[in-house]
Image (cartoon, rainbow, N blue to C red):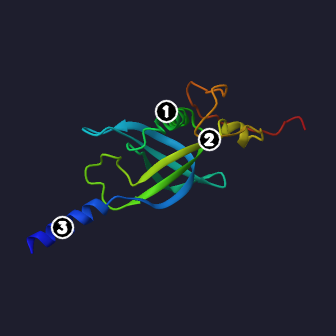
Amino acid sequence: MKKVALILFTIVALLGCSENYSNGERVGLVTQFSETGLFFKSWEGHLNMTQTGMNSSTPFDFSVDNDRKDIYPHVIPILDSAALNGWKVRLHYHQTHGWNWFRNRGETNHFIDSVQILDKNPIASALGGNNQHSTGCKESKSDTIYLGTRDTIYLVLQKNPKE
């Protein structure tokens, strides 16, 4: 009986974190992106999703899969710049089903496969400018990365009193 329980437990443990339970995309602004972990370092992020220009109240937490070192040089700099500069991005992800007991792959079950920059200047787009960028994970080196601080701009519109 103990052997059967041990075999059953081993099968469940091995199949616990199966790959590609679901695939999808999320669009929004990356508000947090950092490397975390005590023993297993992983990149974790938080996306405020947008729907028709407005933020959704449902956040989306994601991880960059530690088992996919091939996407690190492409995804991590783009996500870091998006969090720093307030870029609107589309995240392509896959979700795993089961337990990630040791958190060796990441803290969440949503793992990023690629990133697409949708808008590098959301303020100009909101004011009617056309500043759409559509680059994938392999962003060209000629594409400008805007560095600096992000600030809130308030516009006050008043009627001309002389009219």
Q: Which residue is mark 2?
A: 136
Residue at image location 60% in from the left, 38% down from the top: 87
Q: Which residue is mark 3?
A: 7
The answer to which of 11 and 109 lies nearer the viewer is 11
Kindly indicate whether the residue at mark 1 contacts the one at mark 3 (C-beta within 8 angstroms).
Answer: no
Label ID, residue 137 = none
Say what amino acid the circle numbered 2 marks.
Answer: Gly
The residues bearing labels 1 and 2 have C-alpha atoms spaced at a distance of 13 Å
Above or below residue 4? Residue 30 is: above
Left or right: where does residue 94 sit relative to residue 39? right
The answer to which of 40 and 38 lies nearer the viewer is 40
Question: Which mark is first along the chain, 2 or 1?
Answer: 1
Kindly indicate whether the residue at mark 2 contacts the one at mark 3 (C-beta within 8 angstroms).
Answer: no
The residues bearing labels 3 and 1 have C-alpha atoms spaced at a distance of 39 Å
The answer to which of 58 and 108 lies nearer the viewer is 108
Residue at image location 48% in from the left, 47% down from the top: 112
Left or right: where does residue 50 sit relative to residue 161? left
Kindly indicate whether the residue at mark 2 contacts the one at mark 1 (C-beta within 8 angstroms).
Answer: no
The residues bearing labels 3 and 2 have C-alpha atoms spaced at a distance of 44 Å
Q: Which residue is mark 1?
A: 73
